[in-house]
Image (cartoon, rainbow, N blue to C red):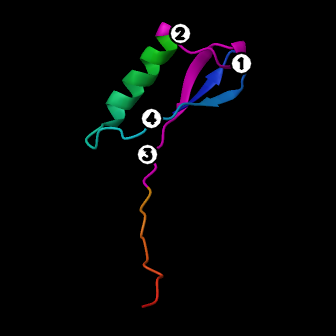
């Protein structure tokens, strides 16, 4: 989740292992609540506006490189 601050800086908050069935509406509502409750103050600045949200998925493939 990316927010802008009172002074126009962009701040990112990360959630690890979010629910798989999360909707865009739920994400927007959560971001609005974070701004309303003013629970984070990165660098002494208030979060002012939700800017962007992304779901990043990473796939890992392991290879056995031990030669018998």
Residue at the left extreme of this rendering: 21
Tell me if label 2 and label 4 are in contact, CB under 8 Å. no
Circle nearer the N terminus (1, 4): 4
Element type where label 3 sits in the image? loop
Other-residue count near label 4 (Cα within 10 Å), few / some / many at <14 / 14–19 / ≥20: few
Q: Which residue is mark 4?
A: 15
The residue nearer to you, when weighing 58 against 28, is: 58
Residue at the bottom extreme of this rendering: 68
Other-residue count near label 2 (Cα within 10 Å), few / some / many at <14 / 14–19 / ≥20: few
Q: Residue 41's x, y, as percent?
A: 62, 14
Label 3, label 2: how far apart the Cα atoms are: 23 Å
Circle nearer the N terminus (4, 3): 4
Q: Residue 38, labelled with which disc?
A: 2
Tell me if label 3 and label 2 are in contact, CB under 8 Å. no
Circle nearer the N terminus (2, 4): 4
Q: Residue 3's x, y, as percent?
A: 58, 27
Label 1, label 4: how far apart the Cα atoms are: 20 Å
Q: Residue 43, labelled with which disc?
A: 1
Q: Which residues are magenta?
A: 37-57
Label 2, label 1: how far apart the Cα atoms are: 13 Å
Nearer to us: label 3 or label 1: 1
């Amino acid at each position: 989740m990316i927010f802008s601050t009172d002074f126009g800086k962009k701040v990112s908050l990360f959630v690890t292992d979010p629910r798989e069935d999360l909707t865009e509406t739920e994400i927007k509502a959560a971001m609005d609540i974070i701004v309303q409750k003013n629970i984070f103050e990165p660098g002494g600045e208030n979060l002012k506006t939700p800017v962007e949200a992304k779901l990043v998925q990473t796939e890992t493939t392991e290879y056995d490189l031990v030669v018998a």
